[in-house]
Amino acid sequence: QARKLQNGRRVKRNLSTGAASWTRFEVTWDQVKSELRRLARTEGFYLGPSSGANIWAARRLATKLGSRKVVCIIAPDSGHYYPDAYES
């Protein structure tokens, strides 16, 4: 099944994975800050809190789904405007 986007292109809905694409996780500010610092230290990514929360949840979802599944997320913000997220 396809749906029309504003620019006129069509994309297929990715509903074949079932409820996993709608899984929700509760994440605390401390978990987000910890994830942001880990991403900066190990991957060189300087991201903002929304990205940190997305990646934190994606890592939990990937663990839940197992190694034969792919989890894709969007990192919507940069750490440029959130220096306090990197403070201890």
Image: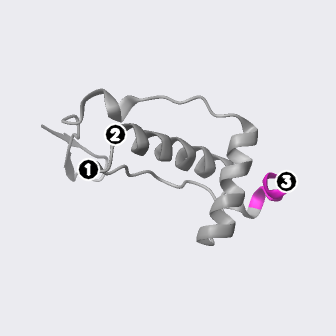
User: Label 3: how many residues lie within 10 Å, few (<14), some (14-19) or many (20+)?
Assistant: few
Mark 1–mark 2 Cα distance, whole angstroms, equals 8 Å
Q: Which of marks 3 and 2 is nearer the N terminus?
A: 2
The kind of secondary structure element at disc 2 is helix
Residue underneath mark 3: 84
Q: What stretch is highlighted in magenta?
A: 81-88
The kind of secondary structure element at disc 1 is loop
User: Label 1: how many residues lie within 10 Å, few (<14), some (14-19) or many (20+)?
Assistant: few
Mark 1–mark 3 Cα distance, whole angstroms, equals 37 Å
Tell me if I can see residue 46 in this picture. no
Circles 1 and 2 in contact, beta carbons < 8 Å: yes
Q: Residue at (34%, 39%) from the top-left corner?
A: 65
> What label sits on residue 68 in the rendered view?
1
Q: Residue 18, located in which quarter of the rendered image?
A: top left
Residue 17 located within the stretch drawn in magenta: no
Q: Would residue 35 appear left or right of 63 to someone viewing this image?
A: right
Residue underneath mark 2: 65
The kind of secondary structure element at disc 3 is helix
